[in-house]
Amino acid sequence: MHRNHQSRFRYRSAAAALILAAATIASAPAVAQDDAAPAPVAASEWTPLDGSKFGAELTDKWIPVPNGTSGAPRQGWLATADGFFTREAHLAYDYTTARNSDAHEVLARFNYPLSRRLWAGVEVPFYQKSGRQDGFGDITLTTQVMLHETRNLSINAGVGWRLPTGETRLGNSVFAAQPQINLWSDVGHGFSLRGRVAYEIADSGRPDSFVLNGAVGQTITPHSKAPFGDLTWYVAGNWREPVSGNGRSFVSVTPGLRTHVGGNLFLLTGIEFPVTDNRSSFNERYIIQLVQGF
C-alpha cells in the first residue's frame, strides 16, 4: 500500500511539473530571432558533405546546417527519425490508453554531434508505470555517421542500441541492436520529408523485425514569431514487421505539431493511433515534449 502511494505521488509530481512547464511556455512573450536562435551560419562556414574529404570531416567541428532553400528547418518531430544531426536536450511525457491498463512514461534525451560526420544520442526512460507496476526503463544509445549532406538533403546511417537496464515486469531488460539508414529532405514550400529503414535484432525471445518510418510536414511561420515560431504540422507513420518468432505486425499514424516558444526552446505535441488490431498493442498514445537547442 505504501509503495502504491509513493508511485502515485511520483507520477503526479512528474505530470504536474510537465503541465506547469507547458503552461509557463505557452504564456511566454515572443522573442526576437536574434535572441532565440544561434547566429545564422555564414556561407563560408558551412559546406556540403559529399565524401571527397570524409576522413578529415570525421574530426571537423559540427556546423549547424542552414534551412532548406524553401525554409524547411532541420528539426525533430515525434514518432519519426532524423536524417540530420541535432544538438539538443529533451524532456518528454506520454500517456498510453490500453484495454488492460493505461501506462505513463517520462524520459529524457540528449543529442550531441561529435563532429560534422559523427553523432551520438542517449534516451533514458527514468519513470514508467503500467497498472500497479512502476520503475526504470531500458536506455537506448544511438550512434550515427553522416553519409551525405547538402542544403536540401541529409542521409545518415547508424545503430541504435537498446540496453537491458529496466524492469522486466514492465517489458524491459531487453538487449536489441537496430542498424538503420535515415533521410531528410526539403521538397519545397516549407515541406520536408523524412524517414528510416531499419532492421532490429533482439534477444529475450523477442522477434527480429523490419522497421519502416516515414513522415511529411510543413513549417508555416518564421523562427522569430515565438511563441508560434517555426510552427510545423506533420504526420508520421510507423510499420514494424516481425520476420522471426511469433510477433505481430504493427502500424501506427501520429499527427503532431511543433512550435518555437522562445529562447531556442520548442514544444511538441502528438497523438499516436494504431492502424493494426489494437487488442495486442494500445488504443492511443498522447505525447508532449520540450526540446532545448544549444
Image: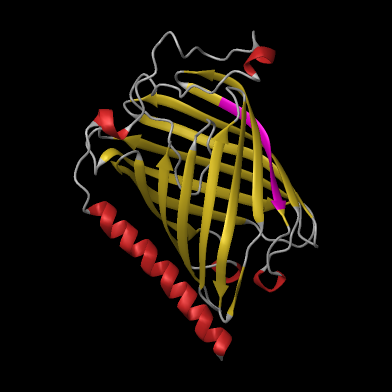
Q: Is residue 271 left or right of residue 23?
A: right
Q: From the viewer's side, name the closer residue of 92 and 204.
A: 92
| Image quadrant where residue 73 sits | top left
Q: In this view, does 133 lie to the left or right of 98?
A: right
Q: Quadrant of the N terminus?
A: bottom right
Count of numbered tags: 0
Q: From the viewer's side, name the closer residue of 206 and 14.
A: 14
| Image quadrant where residue 152 sits | top left
Q: Where is residue 265 in the image (x, y as percent from the top left)?
A: 35, 43
Q: Is residue 277 visible?
A: no
Of helix, strand and loop, which mostly describes the magenta segment? Answer: strand
Residue at 72% across / 70% down in the picture? 168
Q: Is residue 241 left or right of residue 67?
A: right
As displayed, is residue 96 above or below residue 260?
below
Residue that protrudes farthest toward the left in the picture: 29
As displayed, is residue 127 above or below residue 291?
below
Q: Where is residue 187 in the image (x, y as percent from the top left)?
A: 41, 25
As displayed, is residue 112 above or below residue 273?
above
Q: Magenta stretch? A: 155-162
Q: Is residue 203 visible?
A: yes
Picture colour scheme: secondary structure
Q: Where is residue 262 in the image (x, y as percent from the top left)?
A: 28, 41
Residue at 79% across / 59% down in the picture? 245
Look at the image and say whether residue 156 sits in the magenta stretch: yes
Residue at 36% across / 18% down in the picture? 69
Q: Is residue 2 left or right of residue 160?
A: left
Look at the image and say whether residue 148 sits in the magenta stretch: no
Q: In which quarter of the image is the C terminus?
A: top left
Residue at 33% across / 58% down in the picture? 21
